[in-house]
């Protein structure tokens, strides 16, 4: 890997004021020295004290109250400096501080986060680490969200270093770290984005965002704090949470620059949402809320061709992103739950329209994601699927785009596919921009600006009957679990990654 550039980081521009989103009200939390978001889909944060406390993690709710304390057995707390969330519902605590640079070994502890929020004693697995070039002080523990690989960022008045642990850690011997990049001076905190495609390193005064470890940083101004040593990138990628030490210490929300959080493989349209030639913007849905005058959220119901029960609790808006979560839980006589929203009776597009979404899908066995599709408002035949994905295809993920006739015994469809690998995303789980344009005698779909599907009048031969009949179309967003198309979940299904997200939705009508 290349080292961090010695040139000044790229400025991000003047940020908006950082609001306080919660305070740590527990008097036992005197020196909060790390933040990690819950690995479950809930607004819970984990933190811990700096040196001098017992080995324990505090679960903090939205009002700043402690909801649970995890007491770690098989662990000590010489100088805990950070906590991070990892894959498979793991939490990692870093006993990595070494102000005098005398420790021959440092330790990280791994525990599994309980689904139930309750105080408990949990057994930790200890992994010992050693630097290749002698002891260092460090405040920052990074865990890659997908692979679980550990990185330690050292703290120094001069440039620090980023050290990588072995891919497979051994609990029965010391694991040797490898230096892979330089880091800014005096790094006190850091976090990967939930998808792992960028990271943020913070000091007590500023933060720096990176597209890759060792890349060039983008400066992010932070609020003035008392000894700030905690940072976590939020789900939704739009903001980071930063904390500080001291009693009743505040946690601030800091907006991240769009240049950092946007995936370069799926940029927003260069012309902006209102400047598409020949089209007039109709709605620009940024998902700051789910407006009940536009959206129906299905609750306590199900679809016949799947194995999940639809609950409103599985659909939410977080940080300007619509999130639908699949869960392995019993409800309504079914083994799984999921979410579904639509615009029936509230909003529709005419027979000629343009629509665009930016979405991210899970690729887990048994999940069938449909970030946007359309049905006629009059209930007649026809269906336009802008994008569907099947987790059973994780080894070679595909974008599925389809048009249909009537449902039932005479059902016919024309389905086209496009490999995510050809979009630079072999895993299929990155953010992508999907567009459909329906014009007289033609339906065209693109992904990230690449034309991936086209249908024309007469091809297929039933096109005109269903798509040239002057219909209006409502919008639907859902994720199904199981059923004849999606396949059944199995032991390989990682429910911590069973989440579909839509960043925005835009529609246009003819000028």
Image: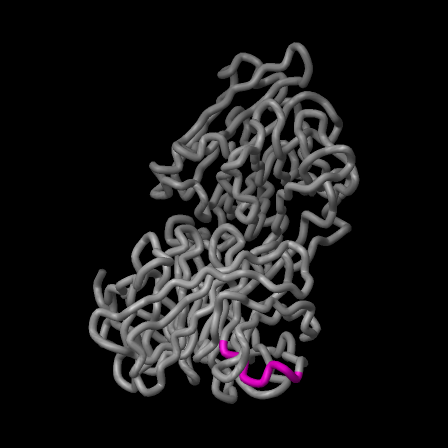
Let me know if residue 31 is in the magenta part.
Answer: yes
* Residue 407 location, quadrant: top right
Q: The N terminus is located in which quarter?
A: bottom left
Q: Residue at x 47, y 45 (%)?
A: 433
Query: Where is residue 391 drawn, in percent x and y?
Result: 50, 34
What quarter of the picture does the C terminus occupy? Answer: top right
Q: In the image shown, does 235 or 113 lie closer to the viewer?
A: 113
| 5 with respect to 150 (left or right) | left
Is residue 346 depicted above or below 16 in this figure? above
- Residue drawn at (40%, 77%), measured in percent from left and top? 139
Residue 195, quarter of picture: bottom left
Residue 8 in view here: no
As drawn, 318 above or below 141: above
Instruction: Give the magenta range.
Output: 27-33
Residue furthest toward the top? Answer: 410
Asked whether, in this view, residue 257 is left or right of residue 355, the answer is left
Q: Return the x and y of residue 97 as percentages of the image width and height.
A: 39, 79
- Between 455 and 139, the one lying in front of the other is 139
**Residue 356: percent from the left, percent from the top?**
53, 44
Residue sitting at x 57%, y 61%: 122
Q: Is 16 left, or right, of 26 in this rendering?
A: left
């Amino acid at each position: 890997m290349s080292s961090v550039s010695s040139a000044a980081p790229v400025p991000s521009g003047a940020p908006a004021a950082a609001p306080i989103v919660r305070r740590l009200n527990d008097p036992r939390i005197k020196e909060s020295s790390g933040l990690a978001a819950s690995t479950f889909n809930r607004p819970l944060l984990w933190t811990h004290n700096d040196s001098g406390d017992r080995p324990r993690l505090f679960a903090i709710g939205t009002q700043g109250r402690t909801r649970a304390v995890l007491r770690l057995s098989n662990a000590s707390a010489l100088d805990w400096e950070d906590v991070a969330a990892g894959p498979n519902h793991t939490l990692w605590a870093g006993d990595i501080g070494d102000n005098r640079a005398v420790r021959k070994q440092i330790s990280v502890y791994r525990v599994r986060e309980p689904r139930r929020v309750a105080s408990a004693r949990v057994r930790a697995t200890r992994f010992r680490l050693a630097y290749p070039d002698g002891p260092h002080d460090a405040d920052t523990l990074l865990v890659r969200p997908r692979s679980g690989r550990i990185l330690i960022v050292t703290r120094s008045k001069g440039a620090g270093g980023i050290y990588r642990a072995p891919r497979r850690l051994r609990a029965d011997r010391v694991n040797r770290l490898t230096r892979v990049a330089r880091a800014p001076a005096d790094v006190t905190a850091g976090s990967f984005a939930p998808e792992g495609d960028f990271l943020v390193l913070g000091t007590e005064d500023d933060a720096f965002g990176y597209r890759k470890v060792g890349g060039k940083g983008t400066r992010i101004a932070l609020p003035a704090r008392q000894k700030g040593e905690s940072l976590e990138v939020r789900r939704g990628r739009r903001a980071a949470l930063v904390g500080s030490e001291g009693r009743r210490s505040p946690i601030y929300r800091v907006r991240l620059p769009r240049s950092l959080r946007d995936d370069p493989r799926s940029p927003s349209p260069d012309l902006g949402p209102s400047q598409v030639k020949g089209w007039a913007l109709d709605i620009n849905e940024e998902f700051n809320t789910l407006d009940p005058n536009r959206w129906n959220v299905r609750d306590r119901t199900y679809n016949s061709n799947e194995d999940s029960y639809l609950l409103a609790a599985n659909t939410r808006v977080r940080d300007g992103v619509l999130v639908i979560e699949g869960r392995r839980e019993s409800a309504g006589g079914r083994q799984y739950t999921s979410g579904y929203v639509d615009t029936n009776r509230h909003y529709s597009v005419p027979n000629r329209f343009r629509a665009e979404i930016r979405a991210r899908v899970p690729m887990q066995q048994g999940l069938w994601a449909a970030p946007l599709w359309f049905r006629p408002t009059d209930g007649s035949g026809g269906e336009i699927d802008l994008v569907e994905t099947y987790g059973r295809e994780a080894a070679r993920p595909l974008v599925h785009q389809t048009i249909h006739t009537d449902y039932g015994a005479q059902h016919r469809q024309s389905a086209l596919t496009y490999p995510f690998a050809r979009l630079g995303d072999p895993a299929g789980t990155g953010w992508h921009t999907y567009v459909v344009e329906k014009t007289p005698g033609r339906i065209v779909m693109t992904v990230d600006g690449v034309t991936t599907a086209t249908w024309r009048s007469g091809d297929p031969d039933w096109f005109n009957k269903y798509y040239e009949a002057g219909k209006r179309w409502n919008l639907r967003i859902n994720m199904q679990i199981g059923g004849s198309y999606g396949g059944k979940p199995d032991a390989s299904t990682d429910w911590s990654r069973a989440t579909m997200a839509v960043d925005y939705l835009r529609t246009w009508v003819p000028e």
